[in-house]
Image: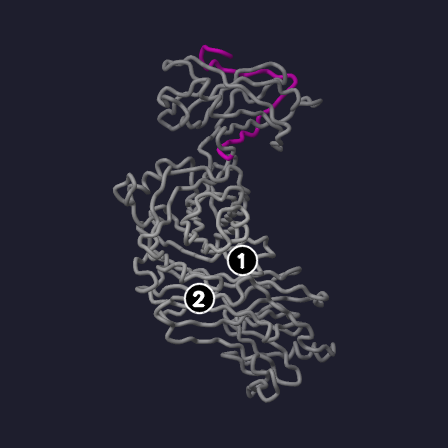
């Protein structure tokens, strides 16, 4: 492995269930009703045992085999993390030959497990809530366990954790502060238990520059070993780092040769495995490639140095990132930096037709942005080696500052979730469109008569040659699309609308300059809307404005009406075409 110094010792946490492989190594009996397992308490089982006797059932008549792509994986970290690393182990159950009897409650647990005394021998588990996932549900009984709490505090130590699955006829219950899970229906036999290892390395050796990236990265991480750390960034917040080899595991092939990394509880990144990269001609089959995912709440915490850039220090670069943001950034949105790194080729800057999938949950959207479009942009960063032999790795700014990564991510506004697909390296974050429509005059339109319409709101002027003068008719047409649509905003219903030019003191414009309250006006002419009205006398419609270069940079105004017979209320926006 090339890791030095060698661990000074290992603590193994083994399930007591391993002891009952033979009668001579059978269950340890307490003075009461149950066999002792670790620090288990005396439990009142009277009701459960009565039911088993009454139904003449055999406890744990079924067996459950947990499976995980991280089985036998070693999580490596450093001593002195700024916070506990999030080390998640996804677990599900191998396909069953028959359904478990109902009612059934299935849980994945970090061992040990125990058995009650003969003649019942009912499996059970008792422990803290963080060592349990469930109840989980069919068909696959998927759940996830966080083993970060088991990270040894001292460098050079390691712990081995067994993972079992139990199915019981009752839900988990509280017993003296711990949770109690019964396996009277099904349990994992010891030989089928999963195991993961958690190992702590000395920080001064593994991460001497204290940036969360291990030195000798390709010796620290391999097909059976990943790396996780949490350190303080230059801005004073935390940077979470997760590194995993892209050499394909058998279990990953079931996911289409994709590899999953989860550096935070609310951040999941899925990247192409080595086979896919080879198939796309990006690397050779013999290449060593790792995925490096870093997460921080502010850009300052992502960068280690600005040498070779235009910026005097990290804070100046971070300020430039904030000032040039292409829209509104949710207050609690993290920057998720993704880099695929080859030992021989360095960072893979573009994946071509391949992509990485980012899923971020728990986002809080800005107030008043319910109808604003959302896209995902990347801040350009560069992960580079500082010395020969792939020894020290640091993050630097790269240009340009911002680039569009996914114009149409999948967004759930209610749950605060976003799913994006990105094909380049960078630090990615959701951006809410800065476009806003506050009002439309008139709000009621005839279906066949062109009407001058004025929108009040905020319409960014980045495409204008002179933002202080506003945006000309030509510039507006090159920057934005305008559509009237039905309430479902279906593509087939979209009717294009045209900008119109109005004479102002600064010249003829289609969009006025921003005023002191950061608002402006946009002028258009309504198109033929008879297709949206149909045979109805009146129908609600929407107005969509969308940036040509980014479909996610948009705003949807609801509440307009198309009416067959209407009294128009207009105002004169100025002299010029269409007024």
Q: How many marks?
A: 2
What residue span does the magenta drawing correspond to?
552-579
Per the image, label 1 sits on a secondary structure element best described as loop
Residue at the spot 36% in from the left edge and 59% down from the top edge: 214
Task: Tell me, for residue 365, which label it has, or none.
Answer: none
Label 1 crowding class (10 Å Cα cut-off): few <14, some 14-19, many 20+? Answer: some
Front residue of 423/375: it is 423
Q: Quadrant of the N terminus?
A: bottom left
Lower sequence index among marks 1 and 2: 2
Front residue of 323/135: it is 323
Front residue of 179/478: it is 478
59 falls in the magenta region: no
Circle 1 is placed at which residue position?
A: 248
Q: Is residue 144 visible?
A: no
In the rendering, at what x and y percent does residue 27 appear? Answer: 58, 85
563 falls in the magenta region: yes
Front residue of 130/515: it is 130
Horizontal placement of 379 versus 417: left or right?
left
Residue at the spot 39% in from the left edge and 14% down from the top edge: 507
Per the image, label 2 sits on a secondary structure element best described as helix
Residue at the spot 59% in from the left edge and 56% down from the top edge: 253
Query: Which numbered disc, 1 or 2, marks the residue closer to the eye?
Result: 1
In the rendering, at what x and y percent does residue 299 appear? Answer: 36, 46
Horizontal placement of 113 versus 478: left or right?
right
In the rendering, at what x and y percent does residue 116 appear? Answer: 61, 81
In the rendering, at what x and y percent does residue 523 appear? Answer: 48, 19
Circle 2 is placed at which residue position?
A: 149
Label 2 crowding class (10 Å Cα cut-off): few <14, some 14-19, many 20+? Answer: few
């Amino acid at each position: 492995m090339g890791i030095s110094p060698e661990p000074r010792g290992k603590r193994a946490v083994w399930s007591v269930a391993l002891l009952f492989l033979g009668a001579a190594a059978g269950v340890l009996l307490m003075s009461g009703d149950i066999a002792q397992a670790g620090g288990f308490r005396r439990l009142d089982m009277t009701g459960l045992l009565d039911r088993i006797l009454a139904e003449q059932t055999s406890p744990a008549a079924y067996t459950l085999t947990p499976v995980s792509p991280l089985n036998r994986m070693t999580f490596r970290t450093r001593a002195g993390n700024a916070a506990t690393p999030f080390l998640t182990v996804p677990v599900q159950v191998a396909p069953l030959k028959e359904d478990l009897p109902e009612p059934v409650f299935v849980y994945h647990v970090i061992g040990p497990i125990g058995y009650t005394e003969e003649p019942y021998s009912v499996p059970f588990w008792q422990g803290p809530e963080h060592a349990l996932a469930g109840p989980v549900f069919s068909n696959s009984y998927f759940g996830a366990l966080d083993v970060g709490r088991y990270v040894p505090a001292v460098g050079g130590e390691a712990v081995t954790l067994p993972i079992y699955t139990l199915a019981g006829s009752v839900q988990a219950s509280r017993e003296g502060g711990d949770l109690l899970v019964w396996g009277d229906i099904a349990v994992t036999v010891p030989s089928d238990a999963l195991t993961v290892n958690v190992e702590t390395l000395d920080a001064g050796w593994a991460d001497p520059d204290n940036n969360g990236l291990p030195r000798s990265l390709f010796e620290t991480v391999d097909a059976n070993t990943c790396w996780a750390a949490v350190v303080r960034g230059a801005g004073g917040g935390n940077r979470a780092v997760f590194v995993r080899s892209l050499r394909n595991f058998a279990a990953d092939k079931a996911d289409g040769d994709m590899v999953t990394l989860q550096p935070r509880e609310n951040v999941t990144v899925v990247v192409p495995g080595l086979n896919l990269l080879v198939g796309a001609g990006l690397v050779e089959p013999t290449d060593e490639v790792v995925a490096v995912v870093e997460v921080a709440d502010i850009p300052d915490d992502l960068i280690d140095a600005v040498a070779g850039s235009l910026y005097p220090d990290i804070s100046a670069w971070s300020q430039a990132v904030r000032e040039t943001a292409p829209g509104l950034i949710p207050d609690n949105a993290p920057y998720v930096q993704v880099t695929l790194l080859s030992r021989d080729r360095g960072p893979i800057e573009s994946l071509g037709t391949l992509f990485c999938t980012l899923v971020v949950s728990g986002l809080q959207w800005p107030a008043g942005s319910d109808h604003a479009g959302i896209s995902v942009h990347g801040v350009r960063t560069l992960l580079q080696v500082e010395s020969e032999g792939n020894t020290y790795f640091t993050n630097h700014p790269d240009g340009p500052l911002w680039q569009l990564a996914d114009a149409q991510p999948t967004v759930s506004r209610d749950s605060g979730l976003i799913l994006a697909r990105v094909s380049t390296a960078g630090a990615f974050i959701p951006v809410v469109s800065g476009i806003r429509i506050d009002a439309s005059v008139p709000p009621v339109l005839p279906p066949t008569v062109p009407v001058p319409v004025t929108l009040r709101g905020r319409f960014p002027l980045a495409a204008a040659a002179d933002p202080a003068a506003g945006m000309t008719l030509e510039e507006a047409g090159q920057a934005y699309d305008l559509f009237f649509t039905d309430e479902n905003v279906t593509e087939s219903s979209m009717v294009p609308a045209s900008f119109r030019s109005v004479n102002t003191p600064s010249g003829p414009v289609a969009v006025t300059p921003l005023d002191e309250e950061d608002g402006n006006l946009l002028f258009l002419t309504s198109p033929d809307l008879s297709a949206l009205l149909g045979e109805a006398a009146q129908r609600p419609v929407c107005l969509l404005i969308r940036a040509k270069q980014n479909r996610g940079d948009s705003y949807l105004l609801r509440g307009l009406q198309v009416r067959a017979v209407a009294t128009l209320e207009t105002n004169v926006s100025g002299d010029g075409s269409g007024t």
